[in-house]
Amino acid sequence: MPAPTAPPEILAFGEAMTLFVADAPGDLDEIEHFQRRIAGADTNVAIGLARLGFHVGWLSRVGDDAFGRYIRRTLATEGLDCRHLITDPAASTGLVFKERAEGGADPRVEYFRRGSAASRLSPGDAEAVDFAAARHLHATGIPPAVSASCRELSWHMLDRARQAGASISFDPNLRPSLWASESEMRDTLNAMAAKADWVLPGLAEGRRLTGLETPHDIAGFYLERGARAVIIKLGPEGSYYRGTLEGRDTSFTVPGVAVSEVVDTVGAGDGFAVGAVSALLDGRAPREALERGNLIGALAVQVLGDMEGLPTRARLAEFEASLPTPQ
């Protein structure tokens, strides 16, 4: 698919991996059949925003292999602008295998990404990015955990987007096993979050990164460091907002959307980010942003796969219309 002539209005970057989901429950060493999909928190959000009609540019690397070609084709089909997706002939595409969990449990996941093409990302890969045309950057804490050069790229993207006046959303998306130490993870991600307008941690992530307990105090930690608003994911209980509205410190909680069956919890937080960020970019009020985030997060857990439950704009309108009116 040829790249559109206009540069992307939204930028996202990170590692997209080829995902193999077990066809049946059980330990991965016993599974014989898998379904092929794609995975990656940053990719999930990029795809979700593209499905809602935003022009999203994806910056990454894939290997010169079948899995890299599969990812490129899938992302292009989803409507992502892949002009900044580099094919690296010297490294392979990352792979991830996921078990089929039962009863709403978190599935066990095994990664094969060490030395992957995406781990070789660096600031030089962003030379052709038109930051002046970008309206928004979505970043997570995964790329800075993957490698030193990816961390340099993360800083570069945050700094250039901020200089250009684009808004920034930051989801910590903790991957402790990828970091050399807890303190390095905490200090790096807190410093990156300080460059964002909207910070979107989960409650457990916020507690781990700040050492504080309540959503109010966790939000205050990031507001004091420069964030405009902090939106904390509370899982099935919903989400919490704290920020400055009409000159006043405002905070509230929006209850979650009940689901009849949880199929796959992976990607729920990414679905929430799609909802909240898209609503804010649409100019919706913060409460409406949290409602949309809760809704898309709930949709994400009801299907198998990381991004299969993310709706189009038309489907989102149908889901939003079906929700009961708050009393």
Image (cartoon, helix red, strand yellow):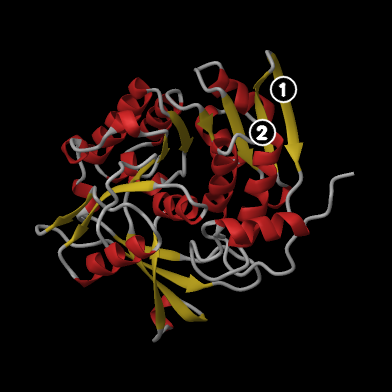
Name the residue furthest front: 5
Question: Badge 2: how crowded within 10 Å, few (<14), some, or many (20+)?
Answer: many
Return the residue at label 2. 286
Q: Determine if residue 85 is in view.
A: yes
Residue shown at 60%/41% (left/top)? 279
Is 250 drawn above or below residue 126 in the view shown? above
Q: Nearer the viewer, residue 123 or 186?
A: 123
Return the residue at label 1. 250
Residue shown at 40%/30% (left/top)? 183
Q: Determine if residue 235 is in view.
A: no
Give the percent coordinates (x, y) of residue 59.
28, 46
Is 31 drawn above or below residue 186 in the view shown? below
Name the residue furthest top: 247
Give the percent coordinates (x, y) of residue 134.
36, 34
Q: Is residue 138 left or right of residue 246?
A: left
Give the percent coordinates (x, y) of residue 316.
63, 57
Quarter of the image for the N terminus: give it: bottom left
- Asked if labels 1 and 2 touch by Cβ distance under 8 angstroms, the answer is yes
**Precedes in sequence: disc 2 or disc 1:** 1
- Whole-number angstrom distance, CA of label 2 to CA of label 1: 10 Å
Is 204 drawn above or below residue 166 in the view shown? below
Q: Of the residues shown, which amino acid type is indicated by label 2?
A: Pro
Q: Of the residues shown, which amino acid type is indicated by label 1?
A: Thr
| Tag in front: 2 or 1 | 2
Name the residue furthest bottom: 32
Q: Secondary structure at mark 1?
A: strand
